[in-house]
Image (cartoon, helix red, strand yellow):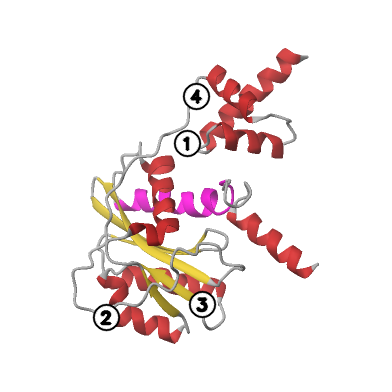
Amino acid sequence: MKIDKDFKLLSEVRQIHGETRGAYGSRRISKRLCSQGHNVGRCRARSLMKKAGISVKHRRKFRITTDSRHNLPVASNLLDRNFQPARPDAVWCSDITYLWTMEGWLYLAVVIDLFSRKVVGWAMSGKMKTSLVTEALSMAYWRRKPGQGLIHHSDRGSQYAGCEYQNLLGVYGMICSMSRKGNCWDNAVVESFFHSLKTEWTADMLYRNRNDARSDVIRYIEMFYNSHRLHSYLEYKNPNDFEKSFMLAKAA
């Protein structure tokens, strides 16, 4: 019966809304329901959301953390906003953001594979220091073990321009690329990830301490963003599935 079907769909819409902390709008809810065997278009999904009394979270503006006021050497912008590499582990992008807790700021550094938008490395600390970004890069390297010549793109922040980080890039056989001064759009993919994290996941949270925030950020990255969050750029797949599809097509 139609009433029973609507009741089931409303229940699933509420479940999706809860699992994603309200991150999904009608388009993504439609795609998610279709993947679960329901033929639900965007208009129908919007109607179901209205009946369920739920709405998507709207994006907010956040401040940029970059401090490029230093005299360290900077690299050229090799990426030049070419955000569509042909394969995984060809280009990685890195950046730093911060989250407020009742214990003080928690700084987060990430490394994102530009092909799949997957977060391949991350690190968190109560201080924004060089070890924060080197730990994120090392995690990414040992997880993925990319070949020589990978392009690593970041802003001109002192953590990335410093000798320790630059030496590590050399050890890993990576080529350094940096955004133009004061131009966050040159690293738009990572900025977009930070917006998603803060808008979809942490905006309504009040963390008692850094450990609570750290656990929640790990949950977002590893249990939602990489493995479940649907990306319009990835044909509404999550990063893990997008990479799997690429590898299967390559092996065929």
Residue position for label 2? 73
Name the residue carrying label 4: 54
Q: Which one is earlier in the sequence, the residue at label 2 or at label 4?
A: 4
Q: Residues within 10 Å of mark 1 (few under 14, many from 20)?
A: some
* Kind of element beneath mark 3: loop
* Residue under pointer 3: 150
Q: Amino acid at mark 2?
A: Pro
- For disc 3, the neighbor class at 10 Å (few under 14, some 14 to 19, many from 20) is some
Circle 2: element type: loop
Could you tell me residue 59's position as x and y percent? 39, 39
Q: Amino acid at mark 3?
A: Leu
Q: Nearer the viewer, mark 3 or mark 1?
A: 3
What's the mark number on residue 21? 1
Q: Is residue 67 above or below residue 63?
A: below
Element on which disc 1 rests = loop
Q: CA distance from mark 3 to mark 4?
A: 43 Å
Residue 154 in picture, x, y percent from top left: 37, 68
